[in-house]
């Protein structure tokens, strides 16, 4: 029986994780669930899984949550609040595995704390890894933690790696990664029309049902840019050896090209419960609840090269990883600010790339060798991105 902490339990990945847990009550016990503010969903989850701890980061919501559970069948749950509490529950002695499913930079410190504590990290929160790069990987190595990718592409690549492979190693006979992308909702939209797309159109992903931030990232293809950086780190590969492939059917979740000419792919229905179950059962497998793939319904699969004119965010991600140092941190921070401004209807869809590019131009790729430098770059890049947004409004 393994103890599980889910950081970001109320989100899309958190909900899918609990669905998988419910199929294997003999293998996983939920120790802690965390939410930012969504106490209604958290309460339902507490009734079903009865964790020892529930964290509600927003203090006022935590007070409301305490009143909600008082007198219920889960009144004994310890309720904590504030972002420090995330680190506390991610490092509890009886927690073996931590699902890192908070969106954005807010997930960095608790995920890093779990890495330092030697936990098995089920990593969905790609922004945390993109921001902290080598520091994160070093923490995993130093503590003997296990790092398993949840992002469907990286999970697919991991599944296609040689037996005994662990993340961070060089897979010697693998010469290339083919990183697949759906192309998002605007793959065929005339470029001139992108200026007027709305947040609702941008979050309506054709193949995957996800949180709002990652859905916008998929529409700009910054999601693939972040995943490119994530793949360089997880699989110790140069960006030049990673080819992004647009595959609109989203049946192949990525491929590894070996020196003998073999290309291994992992396929399945686009449902995050497959990579979640794979990581949770690793090195075994267990049922995820995902329907078997109907290959006759798939019938055919398409592959295209991405158009960097249409998707400048992907180009910026290549530039950031090649520049190195704090540049991926800056890219990520500026993107988080730009996406939020777009969702708040303060900037246009096409401004997202402009904001990131102009923000990156204000930084040099200085050293990112310790956490303080990374957190400083993150804060500075957010401030710069907000300034760029203010300039755009004039
Ligand atoms: P979501 O928006 O649905 O959920 C986010 C979760 O994080 C919620 O539980 C929320 O309460 C919590 N949260 C938000 N802000 C927080 C803060 N400041 N402090 C603490 N907690 C906070 O997001 P999602 O789609 O589940 O994505 C989560 C992560 O997984 C992201 O990094 C995303 O890139 C990655 N991911 C998601 C998918 C997917 O299919 N949804 C696929 C691959 C990777
Ligand atoms: Mg992905």
Image (spheres, grey):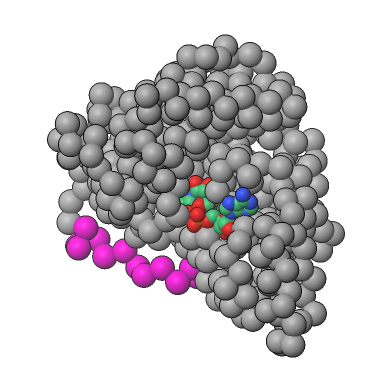
Residue at 60%, 32% (x, y): give it: 131
Q: Is residue 380 above or below residue 56?
A: above
Quadrant of res 234: top right
Residue at 19%, 62% (x, y): give it: 296
192 vs 347, left or right, is left
Q: Position of residue 354 (x, y in %)?
A: 37, 24
Instruction: Residue at the far front: name it.
Output: 394
Quadrant position of the N terminus in the picture: bottom right
Q: Position of residue 237 (x, y in %)?
A: 52, 26
Q: Is residue 62 visible?
A: yes
Is residue 368 or residue 36 the one in the foreground?
A: 36
* Number of numbered tags placed on the structure image: 0
Residue range corresponding to the magenta coloring: 285-298
In the image, residue 389 lies in the stretch drawn in magenta:
no
In the image, residue 293 lies in the stretch drawn in magenta:
yes
Quadrant of res 50: bottom right
Residue at 52%, 66% (x, y): give it: 15
Is residue 115 or residue 361 the one in the foreground?
A: 361
Quadrant of res 138: top right
Q: Is residue 13 visible?
A: no
381 vs 89, left or right, is left
Q: Position of residue 324 (x, y in %)?
A: 56, 18
Is residue 316 or residue 60 the one in the foreground?
A: 60
Q: Is residue 323 above or below residue 242?
A: above
Residue at 43%, 32% (x, y): give it: 225
Name the magenta segment's main secondary structure. Answer: loop
Q: Position of residue 166 (x, y in %)?
A: 62, 41
Quadrant position of the C terminus in the picture: top left
């Amino acid at each position: 029986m393994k103890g599980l902490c889910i950081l970001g339990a109320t989100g899309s990945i958190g909900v899918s994780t609990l669905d998988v847990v419910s199929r294997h009550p003999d293998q996983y016990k939920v120790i802690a669930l965390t939410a930012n503010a969504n106490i209604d969903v958290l309460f339902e989850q507490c009734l079903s899984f009865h964790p020892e701890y529930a964290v509600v980061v927003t203090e006022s919501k935590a007070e409301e949550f305490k009143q909600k559970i008082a007198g219920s069948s889960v009144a004994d749950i310890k309720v904590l609040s504030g972002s420090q509490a995330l680190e506390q529950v991610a490092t509890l002695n009886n927690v073996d595995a931590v699902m890192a499913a908070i969106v954005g930079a807010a997930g960095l410190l608790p995920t890093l704390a779990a890495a330092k504590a030697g936990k098995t990290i089920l990593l969905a929160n790609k922004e945390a890894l993109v921001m902290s790069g080598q520091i994160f990987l070093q923490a995993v190595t130093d503590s003997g933690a296990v790092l398993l990718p949840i992002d469907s592409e990286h999970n697919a690549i991991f599944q296609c790696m040689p037996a005994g492979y662990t993340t961070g190693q060089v897979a010697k006979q693998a010469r290339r990664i083919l990183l697949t992308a759906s192309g998002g909702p605007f793959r065929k939209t005339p470029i001139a029309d992108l200026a007027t797309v709305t947040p609702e159109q941008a979050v309506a992903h054709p193949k995957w049902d996800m949180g709002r931030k990652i859905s916008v990232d998929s529409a700009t293809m910054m999601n693939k840019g972040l995943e490119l950086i994530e793949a360089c780190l997880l699989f110790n590969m140069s960006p030049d050896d990673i080819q992004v492939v647009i595959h609109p059917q989203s049946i192949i979740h990525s491929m590894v090209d070996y020196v003998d000419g073999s290309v291994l792919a992992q396929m399945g229905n686009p449902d995050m419960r497959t990579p979640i179950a794979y990581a949770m059962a690793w090195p075994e497998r267990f049922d995820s609840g995902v329907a078997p793939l109907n290959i006759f319904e798939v019938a055919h699969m398409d592959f295209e090269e991405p158009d960097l004119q249409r998707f400048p965010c992907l180009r910026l991600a290549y530039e950031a990883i090649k520049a190195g140092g704090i540049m991926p941190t800056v890219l990520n921070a500026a993107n988080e600010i730009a996406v939020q401004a777009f969702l708040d209807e303060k900037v246009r869809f096409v401004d997202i790339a402009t904001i990131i590019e102009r923000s990156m131009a204000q930084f040099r790729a200085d050293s990112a060798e310790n956490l303080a430098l990374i957190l400083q770059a993150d804060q500075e890049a957010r401030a710069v991105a907000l300034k760029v947004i203010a300039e755009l409004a004039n």
